[in-house]
Image (cartoon, grey):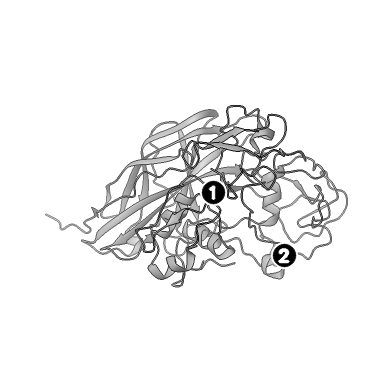
């Protein structure tokens, strides 16, 4: 009998991951090929209110799924995935698209591995997405795992929305610090604006009157990209903290308890929260950059933020993410305070945009609310009242400040757009090229 090249024991998986009703369950490791040096990470995946549209906006939502492992109780590391060989489960017909560390370079198991996958509907439809027995090919040999190692694995997921390729306007909505109205009409981010853009102002690869970025592939928003559907929740940040070293976690944890921040614990493995679905506040730029790097994603740029809000539509003066300038002005009251069903009990507007900010802040509650809270309201009448962007992304106006890569500073213009590799520096900072 040939000796086993590799014996894999599944010591534990994380508990089912919940983020606005996205759920991972029944995780296991199943046989792949010892000769090929890979195994399958198998699980069931489900989330509500999924969509893929064949008309109108014609975009879709997705689940970003990534895997962490550790050997014999050591540090948690990213499981590198192959660029093909993944298997959709039974249920909703699905596409599985691998996300590489560098999207502009070919797959390489050593230098440019798959760091996660986007799982989405493969055909038009709406409703609950369910896939049973979905399998991801994990190239454990490429991760240097020795024969007979005892390996523990955790699977994580984040809801995403696809922003499609195409021209859009920046700066046209006005404001004291707005760009000069410009149509971003090319993916070449160093193309100087000139002429007349179809969506206002001149047309080019960066805003009129600004300095060109350092490289032509700077993420100026013209190309398609994925954006998180919701702000980072407190449970997602807890999951992050619990996979770091203690030194890293100490650097990334906020230790206060104001403004609805409810993450407690002082040692890795003990972090938890009583408000898992509430947006995670008190995150600094280094915190957000580290979370993105750890999850295999990257921060979005200031131009991508404008496209994520407005889409390809003509700019409206003073507009918010939902496409109009009007916003609710009466203080909300909450129902199910802190629960997964937390909602707006009173003063939800059915005619103007809803957002949590100074004027609508709940009496005695100066913090953020559950992600997706406005779309879940029974009186929701569509994009405006739910506070959604053109593409269906939530809370881009209100709840918490967004932190994109800015364009007005040389550091921002030097951004490379490289995705996170799943690994942080020893002191807990992002190590992705910026």
Q: In this view, does 68 lie to the left or right of 174?
A: left
Decide: few, some or many residues near mark 2? Use Cα within 10 Å; few <14, some 14-19, many ≥20: many
Quarter the C terminus occupies? bottom right
**In the image, residue 282 above or below residue 365:** below
Residue 317 on image: x %, y %: 82, 44
Label 1 sits on a secondary structure element that is loop
Extreme residue toward the left, this view: 1
Name the residue at the front extreme: 364
Q: Is residue 222 visible?
A: no
Is 267 rendered above or below residue 14?
Answer: below
Residue underneath mark 2: 213
Along the line of sight, the residue nearer the viewer: 370 or 192: 370
* Residue, disc 1: 279
Mark 2 falls on what kind of element? loop
Residue 225: percent from left, percent from top:
61, 49
Q: How far apart are marks 1 and 2 (CA)?
A: 32 Å
CB under 8 Å between discs 1 and 2: no
Q: What residue do we see at 64% from left, 65% from top?
A: 415
Residue 26 is left or right of residue 241, and the answer is left
């Amino acid at each position: 009998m040939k000796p086993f090249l590799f014996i894999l024991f599944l010591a534990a998986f994380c508990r089912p991951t919940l983020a606005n009703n996205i759920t991972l369950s029944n995780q296991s490791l199943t046989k792949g090929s010892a000769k090929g040096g890979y195994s399958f990470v198998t699980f069931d995946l489900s989330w509500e209110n999924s969509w893929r549209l064949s008309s109108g906006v014609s975009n879709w939502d997705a689940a970003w799924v990534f895997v962490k492992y550790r050997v014999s109780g050591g540090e948690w590391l990213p499981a590198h995935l192959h660029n093909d060989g993944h298997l959709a489960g039974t249920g909703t017909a699905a596409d599985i698209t691998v996300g590489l560390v560098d999207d502009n370079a070919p797959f390489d198991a050593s230098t440019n591995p798959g760091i996660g996958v986007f799982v989405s509907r493969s055909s038009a439809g709406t409703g609950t997405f369910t896939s049973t027995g979905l399998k991801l090919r994990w190239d454990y040999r490429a991760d240097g795992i020795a024969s007979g190692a005892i390996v523990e694995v955790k699977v994580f997921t984040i809801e995403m929305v696809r922003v499609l390729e195409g021209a859009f306007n920046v700066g046209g909505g006005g404001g004291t610090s707005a760009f000069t109205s410009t149509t971003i009409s090319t993916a070449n981010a160093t193309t100087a604006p000139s002429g007349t853009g179809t969506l206002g102002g001149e047309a080019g690869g960066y805003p009129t009157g600004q300095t060109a970025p350092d490289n032509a592939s700077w993420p100026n928003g013209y190309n398609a990209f994925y954006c998180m559907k919701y702000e980072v929740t407190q449970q997602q940040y807890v999951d992050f903290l619990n996979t770091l070293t203690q030194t890293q976690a100490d650097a990334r944890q906020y230790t206060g308890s104001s403004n609805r921040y409810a993450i407690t614990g002082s040692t890795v493995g003990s972090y938890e929260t009583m408000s898992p679905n509430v947006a995670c506040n008190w995150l600094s730029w280094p915190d957000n950059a580290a979370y993105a790097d750890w999850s295999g994603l990257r921060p979005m740029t200031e131009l991508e933020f404008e496209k994520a809000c407005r889409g390809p539509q003509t700019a409206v003066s003073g507009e918010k993410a939902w496409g109009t300038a009007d916003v609710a002005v009466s203080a909300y009251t909450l129902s199910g305070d802190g629960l997964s069903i937390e909602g707006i009990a009173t003063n939800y507007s059915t005619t103007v945009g809803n957002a949590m900010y100074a004027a609508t802040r709940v009496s005695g509650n100066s913090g953020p609310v559950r992600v997706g809270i406005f779309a879940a309201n029974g009186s929701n009448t569509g994009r405006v009242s739910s506070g959604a962007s053109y593409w269906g992304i939530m809370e881009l106006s209100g709840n918490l400040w967004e932190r994109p890569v800015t364009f007005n500073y040389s550091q921002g213009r030097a951004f490379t757009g490289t995705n996170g590799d799943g690994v942080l520096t020893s002191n807990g900072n992002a190590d992705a090229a910026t």
